[in-house]
Image (cartoon, grey):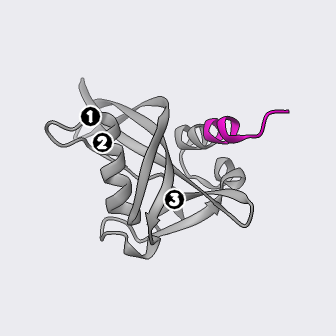
């Protein structure tokens, strides 16, 4: 068994009075959260922030860790257990048009739509957690 680790971010920005998040189109109709592998010496939060900057062009401020997602997949006949730690970030500056070549497109979508529009279940769960953390108290 191989273990793999990544870190990703949920970047929130208020526009038109409601929260939006930055997502990336990785291929065709696959919308995902920005994420990637930590570089040597980077913390999970630092890796998530760097990946967000590279894949979306945005500068952010760390708010808090959201949670980890875990899943299995097969690579070259080996079973890989992957853990992805997700962090909540607040938008500071930057334009999503400035994303790197790793993604087809970066875009803002309303946070409340993210649990339905993101391609991967674990990432939909992260968007739902972010939505619950940002919801006004009743």
Distance between mark 3 and mark 2 Cα atoms: 18 Å
Q: In the figure, 96 relative to 63: above or below?
A: below
Tell me which secondary structure the magenta stretch mostly adopts: helix
Residue 28 x/y as whole percent: 49, 69
Q: Residues within 10 Å of mark 1 (few under 14, many from 20)?
A: few
Residue 115 as seen in the image, left or right of residue 38: right
Foreground: disc 3 or disc 2: 2
Q: In the figure, 116 relative to 88: above or below?
A: below
Distance between mark 1 and mark 3 Cα atoms: 22 Å
Foreground: disc 1 or disc 3: 1
Quadrant (top left/top right/bottom left/bottom right) for the N terminus: top left
Q: Quadrant of residue 38?
A: top left
Residue 83, label in figure? none
Q: Are marks 1 and 3 in contact (CB under 8 Å)?
A: no
Q: Which residue is mark 2?
A: 46
Q: Are marks 2 and 1 in contact (CB under 8 Å)?
A: yes
Residue for point 35% across, 59% down: 53
For the residue labelled by badge 1, is the local secondary structure a helix, a strand or a loop? loop
For the residue labelled by badge 2, is the local secondary structure a helix, a strand or a loop? helix
Determine if the magenta segment contains residue 132.
yes
Residue 23, label in figure? 3
Specify the segment rendered in magenta.
128-138
């Amino acid at each position: 068994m191989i273990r793999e680790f990544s870190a990703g971010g949920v970047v929130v920005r208020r526009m038109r009075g409601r929260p939006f998040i930055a997502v990336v189109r990785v291929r065709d109709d696959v919308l995902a959260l920005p994420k990637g592998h930590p570089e040597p010496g980077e913390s999970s939060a630092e890796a998530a922030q760097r990946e967000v900057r590279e894949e979306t062009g945005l500068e952010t401020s760390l708010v808090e860790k959201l949670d980890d997602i875990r899943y299995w997949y097969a690579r070259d006949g080996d079973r890989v257990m992957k853990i992805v730690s997700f962090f909540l970030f607040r938008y500071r500056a930057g334009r999503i048009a400035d994303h790197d070549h790793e993604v087809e497109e970066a875009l803002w979508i309303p946070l409340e739509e993210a649990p339905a529009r993101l391609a991967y279940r674990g990432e939909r769960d992260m968007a739902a957690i972010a939505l619950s953390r940002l919801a006004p108290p009743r």
